[in-house]
Amino acid sequence: MRNGNTEAVLIYKDGYFVHTMFNKGDKKFIFSSGGTYKAKKGQLQCKIEFDTKEAGNVGTEQLVDFSIAGDKMNVSGKDGMKRVLTRLDDGNGELAGTWRITGRMVEGKINEMPRRDRKTLKILSGTRFQWMAINPATKEFFGTGGGTYTFANGKYTEQVDFFSRDSSRVGAILSFEGTVKGDVWNHSGKSSKGDPLNEIWTKEKN
């Protein structure tokens, strides 16, 4: 959804969703929220895990009515909110899903990252990605970024459309080596700061 230069992008995939607003031209991050959802009889039952505008919403449940016709999705909330969304892709792809970081290379060794309240997730549709570092238990938000991506022949490439902590990263194109084996994704290359990066991501089962 677009209003002038401001874009609103929603990703729903495998029981997790994110809703983000940003202005890519001005390199301005505006807002993001997300959490788990279940779709049932024309209604989305959402439980909020992070909200950059109102931390008090974390842990609450929200009901959103929806209907889909072709490439259009109509949504309406109990607060009177109504939107018409246009589909950006079909949601399919080898990386499409919600992933949680479970390992990171430190001094030549992969350190496992056990499940805990604080977590870093990355949700991908067929063409878009967004990561978020959050702690739903304490209602803390640590950062998010996202944009578009491609994945082909073992090469994963991101183009950054928004970054909550550093607007200078907007427009950057980052390429990584990537392999997927079952529910495990190995991701290596250099971070947006230029530091060496080697991460293990595991697909979430919401």
Image (cartoon, grey):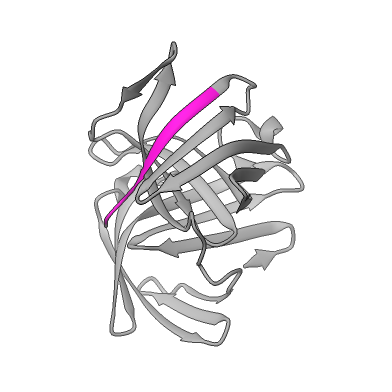
Q: Is residue 180 left or right of residue 60?
A: right
Residue 18's quadrant in the figure? Answer: bottom left
Q: Residue at x 34, y 83 (%)?
A: 42
Please state which of residues 154 and 16 is positioned toward the viewer in this rendering.
154
Visible in this render: residue 161? no
Instruction: Classify 167 as above or below 184.
Output: above
Magenta segment, principal secondary structure? strand
Q: For the point 53% across and 25% down, which residue is it?
A: 197
Residue at left offset 61%, top offset 69% = 88
- Measuring from the top left, give residue 39's x and y in whole percent: 31, 74
Judge from the rendering whether residue 119 lies leftward or rightward of residue 67; answer left or right.
left
Figure quadrant of residue 70:
bottom right
Near-viewer residue (19 or 121):
121
Q: Residue furthest right?
A: 25
Residue at the limit of the structure toward the bottom, as seen here:
69
Q: Position of residue 53 (x, y in %)?
A: 45, 46
Q: Per the image, is 201 magenta?
A: yes
The image shows residue 169, relative to residue 41, as above or below, that is: above
Asked whether the viewer can see residue 126, the reply is yes
Image quadrant holding the C terminus, namely bottom left
Of 51 and 201, nearer the camera is 201
Q: Which residues are magenta?
A: 197-205
Q: Is residue 164 left or right of residue 100?
A: right
* Image coordinates for residue 102, horizontal then vertical, percent: 33, 34
Question: Does residue 94 appear to the left or right of 111 in the view shown?
Answer: right
What residue is shown at x 49% (from left), y 58% (from top)?
94
Q: How many marks?
A: 0
Q: Is residue 171 magenta?
A: no
Quadrant containing the N terminus is: bottom right
